[in-house]
Image (cartoon, rainbow, N blue to C red):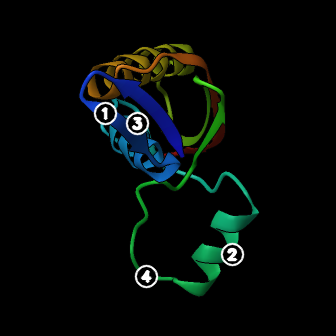
Amino acid sequence: MIKTENHLGVIELHQHFFSDLIGHTVTSCFGVVGMSNSGPVQNIRQKVFKHGSHTDRGVAVYVQGEEFSVDIHIIVSYGVNIKAIVDSITNKVRYTVEQATGFKIKSVNVYVDDIKE
């Protein structure tokens, strides 16, 4: 849970909000075919709930105070420039989170787990 206080009161945002926001942002980027699981909890959830898509799949958000670190696991399309995709994702995630919440992201780590044709 992330809390911030301003003149209107206290604002609390859950980490799942950030995961969903980042998941939607990443899947809309050019060259991204899909997301891959980023941890054991997502692996178990995929085994239990075989149908349905989870927007936070492939996204892990770590909060330390008011600093965020984000790990993103993606699957890219064959034949695209991976560096360009990663740079685009990094910039778009930083911009989207900052515009939606006003919080700054310390680091965005993008892992390319697979390439699909």
User: Please, what secondary structure does the residue beneath circle 3 have?
Assistant: helix
Please tell me which of labels 3 and 2 falls first in the chain: 3
Instruction: Give the percent coordinates (x, y) of residue 28.
Output: 30, 37
Position above or below: 69 against 18: above
Identify residue for label 3.
Answer: 26
The amino acid on which the numbered mark 2 sits, given as a three-letter code, is Ile
Distance in Å between CA atoms under marks 3 and 1: 31 Å
> In this orientation, does residue 77 appear?
no
Position above or below: 106 against 47: above
Instruction: Give the percent coordinates (x, y) of residue 104.
Output: 48, 16
The amino acid on which the numbered mark 4 sits, given as a three-letter code, is His
Please tell me which of labels 3 and 1 falls first in the chain: 1
User: Please, what secondary structure does the residue beneath circle 2 have?
Assistant: helix
Give me the residue at 24% from left, 28% from top.
8
Distance in Å between CA atoms under marks 2 and 4: 13 Å
Give me the residue at 42% from left, 14% from top.
91
Distance in Å between CA atoms under marks 4 and 3: 21 Å
The foreground one among 60 and 16 is 16
Identify residue for label 4.
Answer: 51
Which mark, by number, is residue 44?
A: 2
User: Please, what secondary structure does the residue beneath circle 1 have?
Assistant: strand
For discs 4 and 1, the disc positioned in front in the rendered view = 1
- Furthest toward the right, the residue is 40
Which mark, by number, is residue 9?
A: 1
In which quadrant of the rendered view does residue 43 lie? bottom right
Distance in Å between CA atoms under marks 4 and 1: 40 Å
Q: Are marks 2 and 4 in contact (CB under 8 Å)?
A: no
Please tell me which of labels 1 and 2 falls first in the chain: 1
Classify 10 Å Cα crowding around label 3: few (below 14), some (14-19), many (20 and above): many
In which quadrant of the rendered view does residue 44 lie? bottom right
Give me the residue at 35% from left, 19% from top.
102
Classify 10 Å Cα crowding around label 4: few (below 14), some (14-19), many (20 and above): few
